[in-house]
Amino acid sequence: MRKNLYRIGLDIPLNNDALKFISSLKEDFWIVEEDIIGTQVHNIMLFEQKILDETEIRKILFALEQIKNKIKSNKIEIDDSFEDIHPFIEKSVIDTIGIEIGGKLHTGRSRNDQVSVDLRLKIRKELNKISEGLFALIDILLNLSKNNISSYLPLYTHLQRGQLGVFSHYINNYIAQFLRTLERIEEIYNRVNKNPLGACAIGGTSININRNRTSELLGFDGLVYNSIDAISSRDYIYETLMVFSLLAIQFSRIAEDLIIWATKEFNFIELADEYCSVSSVMPQKKNPDTVELIRSRSSKVVSNLFSTAMIIKAIPTGYFKDFQDLKKKLISSINIILSIITMFKGIFSTISINKDNMRHAIDDSFILALDLAELLVQDYNIPFRQSHEIVALLVKNLEKPEDMLNREKIEKSIFNVIKKEINLSEKVIQTIKNLDLCLERRISQGSPSGKEVKLNIDKLGKWKDSLYTLFLNRIEKVKNAKVLRNRLIEKLIS
Ligand code: ARG
């Protein structure tokens, strides 16, 4: 029989270089499982619609199962002469059960709706895998946060020491960002998880198919209704890469923090040896290579989004082969994101915090300047603009940080600015000498006071739990569809 299933209308076979150039066969193995599932479901539906009879569905499902098992056990021989996975599977079925029955498998379907089903099923699976990884990373971070509620940390803006904080508060900020990303994934998932199957090439089919039934068997939340939209739109890929790109940016900024903190100049943290490399010549060095590569590889995830935008924007409505290359962008971004999650899980479970060095960076600074200015506002009714000036002048003329806590110097600066004698209370002096008291005065919501940090941890935990429930619902729905499908397959094959 003809080797190429489709090329009947052309006289000359595809040039070998051209075949290599256009083939997606290699990367298609990324979606092979989904392709077979989509084909099984399409054919079960054809049987239920009486388009296939009992013998036909039994043979088709049997052949598909056989191919699936061969692929699983790596026994499949890949024939490079195929352009992509779809004719490869169809031809394998035909070779197993003959053209009379195997030739019916693609009835009422096109590769255009088929590939979009495959990709939606695959993206759905990967979004769930990434969500699971993020939830696990968040658990590790929550633990780290709970253990560091009273570990002081200087907070920086412009990489200049700004305000006193605690390590827990900092980690909570990472967790909040990841939770927002999980929220975005949840939202995107609902749009990805729609069924394009049945759109056929672009304009539907005269075969009496049942699109709702394939939706049900694939665990989709309804249809991509319009047949043109179903085969032509790639917004589901774009927004998936959008959320990955955002996540990559979040990862990269965290990597930056860790790289800076791990320098001997900062020395706030120590990364476990197992995540660091050494220099070939400088014996003293311990380099955070893993974190540096997180920073560099995240740029690839962002650029995958850019090239996807460029590919999609050039395509008139309809299917064009350009779409095929989007698969590579997805594979690349997903692999990078998953590997970064694995790295961060390890890094944050083994990180050590150098509390003494962080304390030293606080003591060796004017980090309580704003706390002092606010004390003057609250206890002496000095307008903030003037208290700001008082402390600015005080700090400007000081040689060493401890002098900021010197009663006479503060009183002198107050007099210089507001021309009034004020005797500072013991309470003010004691407060700015005590980091805990300063922190406790930060009563605004979301501040690093002990009370607020604990509240923040509590809120983050609840937020995570509610997103996790939604995630479990997704998993459950996918699982139920699989059970339903497998039961049918078993029944129809036997
Ligand atoms: N390999 C193709 C892809 O990934 C499958 C769809 C082919 N459709 C077509 N009309 N050529 O996009």
Image (spheres, helix red, strand yellow):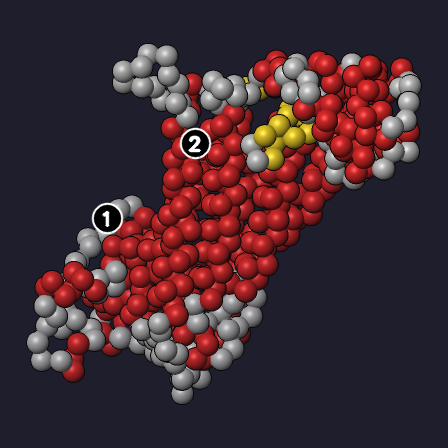
Image x and y of residue 250, in percent:
52, 43
Q: Secondary structure at mark 1?
A: loop
Q: Is residue 319 visible?
A: yes
**Left or right: 424, with 212 as reference point:** right
Relative height, residue 475 to residue 202 (above, below):
above
Q: Which residue is mark 2?
A: 291
Image x and y of residue 281, in percent:
27, 15
Q: Residue 112 appears in which quarter of the rendering?
A: bottom left
The label on residue 147 is none
The label on residue 75 is 1
Residue under the image location 40 percent in, 84 percent down: 203
Crowd class of label 2 (few under 14; some 14 to 19; many from 20; radius 10 Å): many
The foreground one among 483 and 160 is: 160
The foreground one among 187 and 379 is: 379
Residue under the image location 30 percent in, 68 percent down: 322
Q: Secondary structure at mark 2?
A: helix
Q: CA distance from mark 1 to mark 2?
A: 38 Å
Q: Is residue 36 visible?
A: no
Q: How many marks?
A: 2
Relative height, residue 359 to residue 288 (above, below):
above
Image x and y of residue 26, in percent:
25, 54
The foreground one among 87 and 181 is: 181
Q: Residue 435 appears in which quarter of the rendering?
A: top right
Relative height, residue 381 to residue 123 (above, below):
above
Quadrant containing the C terminus in the rendered view: bottom left
User: Which amino acid, mark 2?
Assistant: Val
Disc 1 or disc 2, which is closer to the eye? 2
Image x and y of residue 455, in percent:
77, 35
Query: Which mark sits nearer the N-terminus, 1 or 2?
Result: 1
Quadrant containing the N terminus in the rendered view: bottom left
